[in-house]
Amino acid sequence: MPVMTYLQAISSALREELSADERVLVMGEDIGAFGGAFKVTDGFFEEFGEDRVMDTPLAESAIIGCAVGAAIVGMRPVCEMQFADFISCGFDQLVNVAGKMHYRQGLAVPIVVRLPSGGGFSGGPFHSQNPEALFMHSPGLKVVAPSTARDAKGLLHHAIHDPNPVCFMEHKHLYRRVKGEVPDEIFETPFTARVARPGSDLVVIAYGAMVDVALAATEDLEGASIEVLDLRSLVPLDEEAILDSVARCSKVVIVDEANMTCAAGAQVAALIAEKAFEDLDGPVVRVATPDVPIPFSPPLEQAVLPGVDRVKEACRELLAY
Amino acid sequence: MATDTAATPASVEAGGSGHLELEDRLWLLRAMLLMRGIEQRAMSLYRQGKVPGSFYDGYGQEAVSAGAAFAMAPEDRLCILHRDLAAHLIRGVSPVRILSQYMGRAGGITAGRDGNVHFGDPALGCVGMVSMLPDMMLVATGMAMAFKLRGERRCALTWFGDGSTSRGDFHEAMNWAGVQKLPVIFILENNQYAYSTPLSKQFAVDPVARASAYGFAGMTVDGNDCEAMFEATRAARERALDGGGPTLIEALTMRMHGHAAHDDMKYVPREQVEEWRLRDPVERQEKRLRELGVDVDGVRAAVTAEIDEAAAEALAGPMPAPDGVLEGVFCESSAEPLGDGQAPWSGFAGHTAGSGGEA
């Protein structure tokens, strides 16, 4: 099985879908001749042509809106937001047009919106955001966030095959840092959680780039048996897997790279409070980015993003509870 | 055919568009009468408390949607605005389903999930609007993009108002359609007011003039003449199918009622309404047909009878059952594509209704 980076896995999924299904097209800013800001679509332009690897005007609302139109007449568009932050300019089309279409009139909207998200490299307030919770709060949108190369590919295949709009949160900081064995063929990773490391004393629940942080923080924590649950999908949220981990571990730390208030982890915490109260041996602990814009300068950025030390500390305190 | 699009209302008044048979001209009248009659009935149902929410109508603007929709083929796709009921009727939506829709009944097009004119029957190639205007300009542009990518001879059409021209999506759609030369027809329904805001506070330059800045044709048409609307749209469609790109048609008309049922329209000068009343689109088509010997009163009576029957049936229909309210947020099976609509124009020989779509 070939070893790919997270980024190569995304490229591989897109290339295979473009080859296998003539309804698939990729569209976005600078993705054609230039190959994309992060080179995810490098070489696609030559391989599939300008119609199916479409350089669009600088117009995020149009990218989403036109993808919706193309999807409802039979295409399978995969849109790239150059940075997840720019989805704010296409928010209306995604939330009001795409998300509500099937409920209102039974019309499926099979689009994927790729959202290069997350911080950790001095992207500043407008190139570092994690907007996934906005879409969790908008009915009709699925939201997935891979943490491994294998899942990046499998979830993207699944997203493209799904008849609904899917927000695909791909973490920029993982693009070239994460590698792994990835099947060199089309396969689907289900929109469910995955136990990244089994354990029994405490579970850290995370997704995206925070899975690696959770694994590193809990690799050797005074001999405690610590589970790491990788959510992978935020909508649908794998309630069964979450409640199962909580029942086995009885102590929970939830890590979000997103801003704390109403983040995905807040929903997970609420779920546990409602449905697993009796299983808990301590308070649910959350680690997240405080409610500030992501600052630019490295010491400032590192001061707000959840890192290994903060997760370690949260786990130690909870283990001692 | 790119040169004959500036159909002047005067020439249409004199001799018809040249592409319409008597049966077509009757179809147009019937669609407008149905629209007006259904909306009047819905307004009285609203006043009786049978239409929840508010009620929006297109009184005085019937020609805009009737004429434009009549030029569209079954395989074309439409995103229809809230004062364009005649377009739904032409595509094949029945009056009973429309009245059921207004009343939030199970038999409405959205089965009570969305209100008033927020609907489009996907089976008839129509997509329902959202309240954020003009979002559907981009959806129509995207449909046209797919048609062009696949090399299909079809086009997309959408309507939007004068207020919509101020929003970014207007620009993004016009720009994208111009850049990619897409087979899409934009109909700017200029009815003088966006809610209470007059044109003078909406734009400094008439939006039709902007079409050339986006690289395609724009023209102003008498929006109260259904045959002029038909002719302009027919020509725009031919241009689109021939690879000539988009067209912006500004339909000049007047919103003769308030923005919605609650709006007394006190911000509109009385004389402006009176002036436009003389250009009533239904009366104009009736006059034409009377001169051609048509029994217009007979047509009116038949339409009224049809609406009476539809209203009775809609009122007898059930409300939707709340136990299904959580279902359908997501598509759980494979995506069902849009179907083809009805296209009664005699110019589409052999085409009436279909269910093909883009499977």
Image: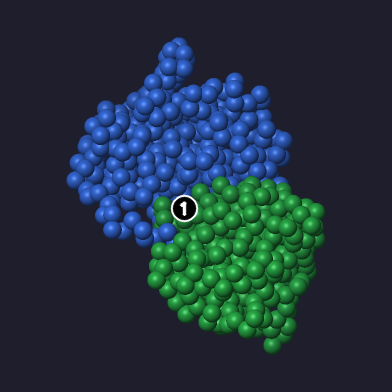
Chain colours: A green, B blue
Residue B168 appears left or right of A82: left
Q: Quadrant of the N terminus of chain B?
A: top right
Identify the chain of the residue marked 1, using the numbered disc in the image: A
Q: Position of residue B60 (x, y in %)?
A: 41, 26
Q: Is residue A153 above or below residue A297?
A: below
Towards the viewer: A271 or A232 = A271
Extreme residue in the front direction = A320
Image quarter for residue A243?
bottom left
Residue visible at 29% across and 37% down?
B51
Q: Residue at x 41, y 46 (%)?
A: B119
Nearest the viewer among A320 and B240 is A320
From the viewer's perspective, tell me whether residue B266 is left or right of residue A91. Answer: left
Residue named by callout 1: A100
In this rendered view, identify the residue nearer to me: B145 or A316.
A316
Q: Is residue A230 above or below residue B27?
A: below
Q: Residue at x 49, y 23 (%)?
A: B196
Where is residue B2? Give x, y as percent: 65, 40
Task: Specify whether residue B47 is in view.
Answer: yes
**Is residue B240 something one can see in this rendering?**
no
Q: Which quarter of the picture shows residue A167?
A: bottom right
Hey, what amino acid is under mark 1?
Lys
Q: Residues within 10 Å of mark 1 (few under 14, many from 20)?
A: many
User: Which of the 4 image quarters holds residue A225?
Assistant: bottom right
